[in-house]
Image: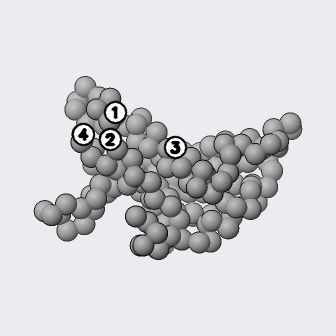
Amino acid sequence: MLTIIDDGKPAPAPVFQARIPVRWGDLDADGHVNNTVFLRYVEEARMQWAQALSLSASAPGLTPVVANLACEYLAPLHYPATVIVSIACAHAGNSSLQLLFSLHVPADAAALAPALHARARITWVWLDAGTGRPHAMPEALRAACAAPITPSSAA
């Protein structure tokens, strides 16, 4: 089985969390959130984080691309629910950033802990739009990876 986050090292602290409501249209014929929608939740959280950092979708002359993507599905998601997508930085290179995502539903009165539904890992790479060659990522992202959120800022 592919393991996305548990590589024997402690998980890095989250740098951002997004709350995303499950929509009725996210469900498939089996009555649970379709597996491709999990990846849209990951994308939405990543874009909310970029917006919170005041980064445009692409800086002039730069094109960010997802070079690698993997997702491990752990439990089905159902409607209604709100998914909390946590983002952690696993590695920051010069032109690339490896991000870890956990998708969970908050604990209710009957649960002792939030239910983890999926984990994902992406490699986000910045390219020079003119040459298609790797380019240094925005410094705001590198700085954001060094500043994990605190429980009070995760609300």
Q: What distance separates the C-alpha of mark 4 from that of mark 2? A: 6 Å
**Badge 4 vs badge 2, beta-carbon distance below 8 Å:** yes
How far across and down, in percent of the image, does residue 37 sit?
A: 40, 37
Q: Is residue 36 visible?
A: yes
What label does residue 26 carry, if any? 1
| Local SS, label 4 | loop
What label does residue 79 carry, if any? 4
The 10 Å Cα crowd at callout 4, few under 14, some 14 to 19, many 20 or more, is some
Q: Quadrant of residue 6?
A: bottom left
The C terminus, quarter of image: bottom left
Q: Is residue 56 left or right of residue 103?
A: right
What label does residue 93 carry, if any? none
**Badge 1 vs badge 2, beta-carbon distance below 8 Å:** yes
**Badge 3 vs badge 2, beta-carbon distance below 8 Å:** no
Q: Tell me the residue at 23%/30% (across/down).
A: 30
- Amino acid type, callout 4: Tyr
**Badge 1 vs badge 4, beta-carbon distance below 8 Å:** yes
Q: What distance separates the C-alpha of mark 3 from that of mark 4? A: 20 Å
Q: Earlier in the sequence, mark 3 or mark 1?
A: 1
- Amino acid type, callout 1: Asp
The 10 Å Cα crowd at callout 2, few under 14, some 14 to 19, many 20 or more, is some
Q: What distance separates the C-alpha of mark 1 from that of mark 4? A: 8 Å
